[in-house]
Image: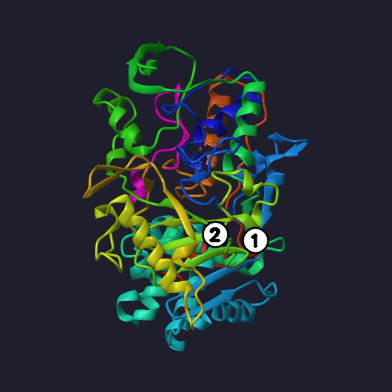
């Protein structure tokens, strides 16, 4: 995502660009994956994914890039559809949440927050305490967020240890675990708190809708038109290219050694952008590079977790809800979406063997907690066990009150993200883990421009407004890298636009007051 986004911004400004990708295809974790050996004569392979695509309303950078990618006389952005519901599923009970009216006063905000969590069985006093915590975040200045909230774990900020199990499970872990794959006990309040707020504000307040999804498999709706657009601007896309080392010469990157289709080659260009994931980049940063670029010296201290998808191919489509489902009681933090309802132009009879009527796309965000079937964490399961366990957890949430929503007889086949690799039956590894944000970890994250004057970074560990390992964060990082190259090259081309998070204007005077308190060394004013 970071590499293709940077290539687009640079090529649109007249730069010559080449993208080197270790796989034969492009798009990273965002791309679709044709299910091997699933096609029959005259039909296309079944579409697999790393996980469903999720474009919440607070995304600004990525949609802006999508608007400039042509697709069938329109743009890729026009392939986004709004969902209309969010389903909160629990074992034995289902609840649906949807936006009501736009809140206009502080009392409105408290009321809306309370109604958002009203059906979770949390004591009123604890619910009001949590709402107060959210309002503290909304009325805190940016300086306090960086100096204080970055170093406080979300679990501690919301005082989860002293609260009920329902509070801990639904407010402490809920969104944190299933949507951003992080542990509330260690994750930074600055990251988790403000991402949670953006999701909640979008759910309650976005006039056009809270969430968007693609109207077809990701490659068809987005990646293939994107590749075609880049190639039309002369971008050279070099697949099967594995970066072996960065060569430092006179304080600059002199060349990058790449292995292409098994053959070594050396790249010597004006500027380099690394869009590699943090765990790969950390292995390429030598001691010499660390001395010249101290901001890269601690990449190995950044942590990752797993968030990967599994698709269930159904004989008969089960729409569930027109949006995402969040399975709050699932040990593996499952979320899902029923794809067919959003893919009006896809001929399902032309996929696979022609028998698939629907696709339930599921994300697994907790790979360390024992499941309900085998009593094992997902990392200790075989692929078949992961399928059985995830399916069982879905049924435990959806088959309630005597209604069988999911039946075994309706399941035709399944496809697990191939980035989950099995060197032996009891130890899975992940080729593309996800950066997480423990409290205090911002100090180890570099800016998009490094101390090496021709090396720039466009990956989700870069410091950004988005501050989360997402497509949006990688796109924003790419824009920051491009802007740094524009400065370094003396280009007069317009800068790539950047957007901070939008927050309700009603809280601006309180944030300004909190800035005064912060400068005076005073704590945040409580009693909202």
Q: Which residue in the structure is indicated by mark 2? A: 337
> Tags 1 and 2 in contact by the CB under 8 Å rule?
yes
Say left or right for 337 vs 519: right
User: Tell me, what colour scheme is on the image?
Assistant: rainbow
Residue 213 image offset from top left, x and y in percent:
62, 53
The percent position of residue 485, horizontal first and vertical second, equals: 54, 25
Q: Nearer the viewer, residue 356 or 260?
A: 356
Look at mark 1 in the image and give the residue it sits on.
83
Marks 1/2: CA distance? 10 Å
Q: Which residues are magenta?
A: 440-460
SS at mark 2? strand
Q: Quadrant of residue 254?
A: top left
Magenta: main secondary structure: loop
Residue occupying the far front of the picture? 41
Q: Is residue 62 magenta?
A: no
Instruction: Name which residue lies at 62% across and 82% down.
Output: 107
The residue carrying pointer 1 sits among few (fewer than 14), some (14 to 19) or many (20 or more) residues within 10 Å by Cα, namely some
In front: 232, or 34?
A: 34
* The quadrant where residue 163 appears: bottom left
Is 356 on the left-hand or right-hand side of 434? right
Residue in the foreground of this view, choosing between 212 and 126: 212
Q: Assign a secondary structure to mark 1.
A: loop
């Amino acid at each position: 995502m970071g590499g293709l986004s940077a290539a687009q911004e640079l090529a649109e400004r007249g730069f010559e660009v080449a993208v080197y990708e270790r796989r034969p295809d492009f798009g990273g974790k965002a791309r679709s994956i044709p299910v091997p050996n699933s096609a029959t004569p005259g039909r296309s392979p079944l579409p697999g994914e790393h996980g469903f695509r999720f474009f919440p309303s607070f995304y600004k950078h990525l949609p802006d890039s999508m608007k400039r990618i042509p697709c069938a006389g329109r743009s890729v952005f026009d392939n986004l559809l709004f969902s209309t519901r969010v389903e909160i599923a629990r074992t034995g009970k289902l609840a649906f949440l949807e936006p009501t009216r736009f809140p206009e006063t502080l009392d409105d905000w408290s009321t809306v927050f309370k109604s958002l969590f009203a059906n979770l069985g949390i004591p009123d006093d604890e619910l009001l305490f949590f709402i107060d915590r959210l309002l503290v975040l909304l009325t805190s200045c940016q300086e306090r967020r960086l100096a204080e909230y970055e170093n406080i774990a979300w679990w501690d900020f919301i005082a989860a240890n002293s609260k009920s199990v329902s509070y801990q499970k639904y407010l402490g872990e809920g969104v944190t675990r299933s949507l951003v794959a992080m542990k509330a006990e260690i994750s930074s309040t600055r990251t988790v708190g403000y991402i949670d707020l953006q999701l909640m504000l979008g759910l309650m307040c976005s006039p056009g809708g809270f969430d968007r999804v693609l109207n077809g498999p990701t490659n068809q709706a987005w990646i293939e038109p994107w590749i075609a657009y880049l190639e039309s601007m002369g971008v050279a896309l070099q697949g099967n290219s594995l970066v072996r080392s960065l060569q430092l010469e006179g304080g600059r990157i002199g060349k990058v050694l790449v292995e292409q289709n098994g053959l070594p080659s050396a790249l010597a260009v004006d500027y380099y952008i690394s869009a590699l994931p943090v765990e790969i980049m950390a292995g390429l940063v030598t001691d010499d590079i660390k001395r010249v670029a101290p901001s890269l010296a601690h990449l190995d201290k950044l942590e990752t977790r797993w968030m990967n998808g599994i698709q269930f191919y159904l004989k008969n489509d089960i729409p569930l809800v027109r949006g995402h489902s969040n399975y709050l009681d699932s040990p593996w933090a499952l979320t899902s979406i029923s794809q067919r309802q959003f893919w009006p132009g896809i001929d399902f009879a032309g996929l696979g063997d022609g028998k698939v009527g629907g696709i339930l796309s599921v994300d697994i965000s907790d790979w360390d907690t024992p499941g309900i079937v085998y009593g094992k964490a997902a990392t200790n399961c075989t692929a078949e066990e992961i399928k059985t366990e995830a399916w069982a957890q879905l049924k435990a949430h959806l088959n309630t009150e005597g209604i069988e929503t999911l039946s075994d007889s309706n399941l035709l086949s399944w496809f697990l993200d191939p980035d989950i690799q099995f060197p032996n039956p009891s130890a899975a590894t992940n080729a593309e883990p996800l950066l997480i944000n423990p409290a205090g970890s911002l100090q180890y994250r570099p800016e998009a421009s490094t101390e090496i004057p021709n090396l720039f970074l466009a990956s989700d560990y870069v410091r950004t407004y988005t501050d989360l390992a997402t497509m949006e964060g990688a796109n924003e990082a790419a824009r920051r890298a491009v802007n740094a190259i524009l400065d370094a090259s003396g280009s007069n081309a317009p800068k790539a636009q950047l957007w901070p998070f939008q927050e309700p204007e009603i809280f601006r005077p309180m944030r300004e007051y909190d800035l005064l308190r912060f400068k005076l060394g005073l704590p945040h004013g409580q009693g909202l």
